[in-house]
């Protein structure tokens, strides 16, 4: 230790400059740790700060001639603390749990080191184990850089490991205790060079790891965004271009992401906005001040094919200046379609209620008027039966309307019950055709009935429901045909020859033999072409012209006073109900206009042999 005084030839400012260099690098580490919030950077920075104190201690020993025992004590305390903290930082770097026995061992050795000046034998016994333990901590840290898998390449791992292990060897080499002055100077500067190079290597590793994590996060974010149902974009006001655009955005705005990168102004080429959201169009032309959003609609060939919802917000720099805008687009086409369907349903409901209200009000008003006339004895005695028949007729109309409404409700809830049985087609439809003949004749029209049914044809039907369908068709024709005109009714079977020829004889028990086709054709004014696709829809009652004279004549045939007649609007439920019943029988229903005038409505159901 006496040789320390002979080191005065080493300039003091060189040692001070070296210490300042290490101190500066340690401060850089601490600043980086504050920015990154990484514990390993903070611990490594503290260890370099402690090592700076160790070099400062060497400087003081050179100029003030510290007592050797105290010099060794302070230097070993600093070396132990710095090495242990560096190892802790390494554990955090590799996300490993620190070894608790090492912490307890370090505390015990620090306590023994404090006893150096007062207990000579402890100094003699503990100094070598202390040196070995301190170096061992750094060697463990160096080996971790090789043994654990992490983001750096092998040469960088080897370089970091080499300098850590070298520093572990040199940290406890007390150069100023050597008698050989040149060797003392050499070991001092080798140690100084090693620690500073090690600090620089770790700083480089830190920045490369940050870059790797940034790329990884960016890739993960891009993968998340590109697999998301939403589309995102980031627009930079300084470069006047997009930094990122989701590839899926083309489905919402009609322009691809590649086109947007090249020509950002095309964002709104194919989309339009509602009047209240017109400000959205200018979000890329000038920086926005606050978050916003709105609705976009994509036009293709003049038709809206997509609806999207856009939300955006400004991105500010450290000075608060808006530098970019980021946003998200969400496909709301299905939602918009549901809203439109809901509006249509509400409108249909409104029209339906208005229609039904009129349907109910008309017979109720007539019943009320007839009843008051009878009660006030205004009606002649000979006309009493006529008025009572009219009241009964209007009451029956109300009953029919209520039944129709109940059936529509059953269709909506899918709770309509059917009783399907096998019947001979001839037996069922002969009876139904007789009913048609009577119903048409009673209305003052001329029935023209034709029938051609295959012998042995079997149908599987709910007879009451089929009767209801036919009654609806006959009533519909009566309403739209002038009294005295013909109403044609035909029923025939058509065999499916082509289908039957291709089916084996032993496998035809579930295959229909053909179709039973029932047609009602009137000689009224027909159905407007624009209404043909809609006449089987619920509540549809427009388009058909009702002849007031024809209806009045029909009413007179039933015995009603002519003065009380007026053409009435039909609820539009009959054909809708008929279509639903026929569908449940695996059949179909069509409507068309005849070449000679009037409308023709046909339904068909399968029959079996």
Image: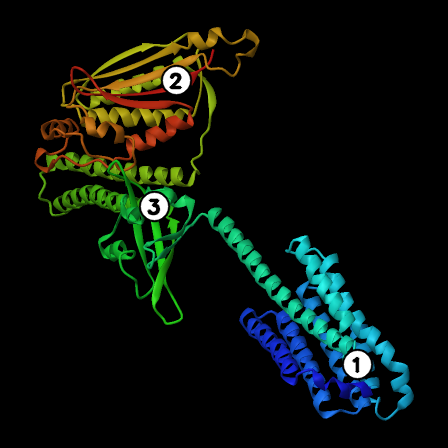
Which callout, 1 or 2, points to the residue nearer the camera?
1
Number of other residues with Cα within 10 Å of mark 1, as a class: few under 14, some 14 to 19, many 20 or more: some
Q: Which mark is residue 428?
A: 2
> Which residue is label 3 attached to?
262
Q: Is residue 556 left or right of residue 459?
A: left
Q: Is residue 552 above or below residue 105?
A: above
Residue 215 position in % (x across, y down): 53, 54
Residue 167 position in % (x across, y down): 73, 70
Give the CA distance from mark 3 to mark 1.
64 Å
Residue at position x 49%, y 50% from top? Answer: 222
Of labels 2 and 3, earlier in sequence is 3
Give the CA distance from mark 1 to mark 2.
106 Å
For label 3, the SS is helix
Of labels 1 and 2, earlier in sequence is 1
Number of other residues with Cα within 10 Å of mark 2, as a class: few under 14, some 14 to 19, many 20 or more: some
Give the CA distance from mark 2 to mark 3.
74 Å
For label 2, the SS is helix
Residue at position x 26%, y 43% from top? Answer: 352
Which callout, 2 or 3, points to the residue nearer the camera?
3
Of labels 3 and 1, earlier in sequence is 1
Q: Is residue 490 above or below residue 166?
A: above
> Which residue is label 1 attached to?
107
């Amino acid at each position: 230790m006496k040789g320390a005084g002979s080191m005065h030839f080493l300039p003091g400012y060189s040692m001070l400059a070296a210490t300042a260099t290490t101190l500066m690098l340690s401060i850089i580490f601490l600043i980086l740790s504050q920015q990154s919030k990484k514990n390993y950077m903070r611990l490594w920075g503290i260890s370099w700060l402690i090592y700076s104190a160790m070099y400062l201690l060497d400087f003081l020993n050179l100029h003030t001639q510290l007592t050797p025992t105290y010099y060794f004590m302070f230097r070993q305390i600093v070396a132990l603390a710095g090495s242990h903290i560096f190892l802790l930082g390494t554990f955090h770097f590799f996300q490993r749990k620190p070894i608790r026995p090492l912490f307890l061992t370090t505390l015990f050795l620090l306590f023994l080191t404090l006893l150096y000046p007062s207990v000579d034998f402890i100094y003699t016994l503990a100094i070598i184990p202390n040196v070995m333990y301190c170096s061992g901590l750094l060697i463990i840290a160096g080996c971790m850089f090789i043994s654990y898998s992490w983001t750096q390449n092998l040469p960088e791992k080897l370089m970091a490991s080499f300098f850590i292990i070298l520093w572990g060897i040199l940290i406890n080499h007390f150069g100023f205790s050597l008698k050989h002055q040149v060797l003392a100077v050499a070991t001092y500067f080798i140690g100084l060079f090693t620690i500073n190079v090690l600090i620089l290597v770790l700083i480089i590793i830190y920045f490369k790891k940050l870059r790797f994590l940034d790329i990884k996060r960016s890739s993960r974010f891009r993968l998340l965004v590109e697999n998301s149902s939403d589309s995102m974009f980031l627009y930079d006001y300084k470069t006047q271009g997009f930094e990122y655009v989701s590839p899926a955005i083309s489905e919402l705005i009609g322009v691809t992401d590649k086109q947007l990168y090249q020509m950002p102004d095309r964002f709104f080429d194919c989309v339009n906005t509602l009047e209240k959201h017109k400000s959205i169009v200018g979000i890329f032309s000038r920086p926005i001040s606050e978050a916003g959003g709105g609705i976009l609609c994509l036009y293709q060939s003049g038709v809206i094919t997509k609806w999207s919802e856009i939300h955006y917000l400004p991105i500010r720099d450290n000075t608060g200046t808006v530098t970019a805008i980021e946003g998200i687009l969400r496909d709301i086409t299905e939602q918009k379609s549901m809203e439109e369907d809901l509006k249509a349903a509400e409108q249909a409901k409104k029209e339906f209620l208005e229609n039904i209200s009129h349907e109910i009000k008309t017979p109720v008003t007539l019943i009320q008027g007839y009843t008051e006339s009878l009660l006030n004895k205004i009606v002649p005695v000979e006309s009493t039966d006529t008025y009572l028949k009219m009241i009964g007729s209007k009451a029956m109309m109300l009953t029919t309307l209520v039944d129709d409404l109940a059936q529509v409700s059953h269709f909506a809830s899918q709770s309509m019950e059917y009783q399907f049985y096998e019947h001979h087609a001839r037996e069922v439809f002969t009876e139904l055709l007789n009913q048609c003949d009577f119903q048409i004749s009673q209305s003052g029209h001329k029935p023209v009935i034709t029938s051609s049914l295959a012998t042995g044809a079997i149908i599987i039907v709910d007879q009451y429901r089929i009767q209801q369908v036919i009654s609806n068709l006959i009533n519909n024709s009566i309403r739209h045909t002038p009294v005295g005109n013909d109403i044609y009714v035909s029923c025939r079977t058509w065999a499916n020859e082509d289908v039957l020829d291709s089916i084996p004889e032993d496998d035809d028990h579930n295959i229909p033999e053909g179709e039973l086709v029932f047609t009602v054709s009137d000689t009224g004014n027909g159905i407007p072409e624009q209404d043909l696709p809609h006449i089987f829809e619920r509540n549809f009652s427009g388009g058909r012209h009702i002849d007031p004279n024809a209806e009045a004549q029909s009413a007179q045939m039933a015995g009603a006073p002519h003065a009380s007649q007026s053409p009435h609007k039909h609820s539009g439920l009959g054909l809708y109900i008929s279509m639903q019943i026929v569908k449940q029988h695996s059949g179909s229903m069509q409507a068309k206009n005849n070449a000679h005038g009037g409308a023709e409505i046909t339904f068909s159901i399968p029959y079996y042999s």
